[in-house]
Image (spheres, rainbow, N blue to C red):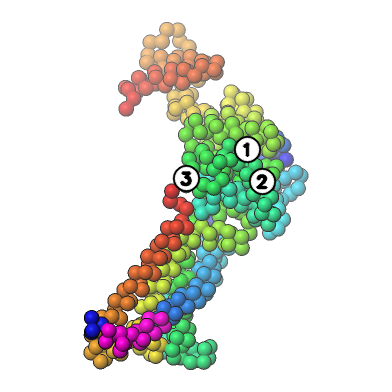
Amino acid sequence: MIRLEHLSKTYSGRTGTHQALRGIDLHIEAGDVFGIIGQSGAGKSTLVRCINLLERPTEGHVLIDGKDITAYRGKELAKLRESIGMIFQNFSLFQQRTVLRNVMFPLELRHANKREAEARARELLKLVGLEDKGDRYPVQLSGGQQQRVAIARALANNPKIMLCDEATSALDTMTTHAILNLLRDINRELGVTMVVITHSLSVAQQVCNKVAVLDEGVIVEQGATAEVFGNPQSEATRRLIAADKGLLLDEYVAAQHEPYMGVPETPASAIAAGVINAADSIQAGNPAGTAAILDPVREAKGGDK
Amino acid sequence: MEAITAFIDQYGLLMAQGTWDTIVMTVLSTLFAYVIGIPLGVLLILTAPGGLHPHRVFNSVLGWLVNIGRSIPFIILIVFMIPFTRAIVGTSLGVGGAIVPLTVAAAPFVARMVEQSLAEIDGGLVEAAQSFGAGTWQIITKVFLVESLPSLIRGASITFITLFGFVAMAGTVGAGGIGDIAIRYGYQRYQDDVMIVAIVLCVVIVQVAQSVANLIARKIDHRVK
């Protein structure tokens, strides 16, 4: 469905050049919820913007449904973008338009019949659970509700693909969970292929069937989500896993590699043993493991400030 | 009481005509200044570095022209433009003769005001619009001008009040209006009562204009709950 071939993006400014993406090869299949995960500055946002050409790649090609779209411009590009919905970290809703007119915006752009557009927008608001908020303005809604409006807007043109750029990073945990569930439902019920950009391991684990780990503009690892995170091959992936557990990389690595030495005598190995136990219990699906993993670390650091 | 009646009898018509002329000159030149200034402001934003169509040379040249327009003192501009004004409206006197230099003086000012209002728009909104396939014209008409409307209206009230002051200057070279009356009667003929009434009228007009603009801006701004 989406194929990126040897994609590179270089920014040149007064202070020199910066290579945001280097030789990216990626294949996203129809129906995937494909996660692109990495730390800030890894190039995730640039990568996702190459798919709808908000950013033009310096080298390489973007293929959608087998067609090379890299050189699309004008009407051709507008047409393509109609089939790709997008949602953003800060929702990017039009503040001077009502919720309903926000959802109608993509339809307005292609001069759709006004009555049909309105009916379609109301239908979408119902889908995201906001059918009673059509006449409100974005400022009157909570963050989670605003992102729901943005999702409805992104679906207005019946896209085959939806790009989600850190869509839950501005939301709290509970709201994040609800939004991710909604995205997964849309993927399953409407068959929309999703590209999910995130720095959060738990977000990727919750919704993505496949992930690619991006580090300094290079894809260092990709595959099925469970495989990549269950058996990390690269330092970048391990760093993301450690960050998700609230650890620094060396603490996490210590916990992974410290050999078992019988009854632990030193505080360091005590921590390591605790972490390993806790990690096991997390894998076994016991949420109490998170506390167990952090407590010995905090104690050894001399208390949590 | 008698004094007031006598004043109205003597100067009422004159003051009413002057007030009307001033309002007509200010409103029309504000309007024309926006007709020219909005496209200029939009062009400045579009061609700015990081804009939708960055073009350094075009942007710099336009910026210079706007700055030149803003740096000529208005009183000099009126005189300098007399031949041009005559060519356009057939006279350099009266309401018609004043509107041409007023518009020319205000358009660069408006261009900067519009540029300022548009610069405040969240770049994420422009990107979102693009992601749905919006072209430049659609972004201008459906994002730029809609999202910045409250700010544009506040800017228009500033332009209106600035031009209101300019109209008084235009009065000294034959444009008429309330400022002209204040100078001719109040200053040159030492008629303090005319001067004071003219000043009060000016204050009232400016206050009303500002209040109306604030009210409209607040009414149409949906960023506040």
Residue that appears at 49% across and 88% down: B85
Which residue has dot 1 on it? A127
Residue A8 x, y percent position in the rendering: 62, 47
User: Sequence-wise, which precedes: disc 3 or disc 2?
Assistant: 2
In the image, farthest residue toward the front:
B2
User: Sequence-wise, which precedes: disc 2 or disc 1?
Assistant: 2
In the image, farthest residue toward the top:
A263
The secondary element bearing badge 2 is classed as helix
The secondary element bearing badge 3 is classed as helix
Q: Main secondary structure of the magenta part?
A: helix
Image height check: is B75 above or below A133?
below
Residue that appears at 44% across and 15% down: A274
Which residue has dot 2 on it? A120
Question: Closest to the observer: B133 or A299?
Answer: B133
What amino acid type should be assigned to the residue bearing mark 3? Gln
Question: Closest to the observer: A113 or B147?
Answer: A113
Which stretch did the figure color magenta?
A: B5-21
Q: Are marks 3 and 2 on the same chain?
A: yes
Location of the C terminus of chain A (image quadrant): top left
Seen in the image, is A301 located left or right of residue A160? left
Q: Are marks 1 and 3 on the same chain?
A: yes
The secondary element bearing badge 1 is classed as helix
Residue A140's disc is 3
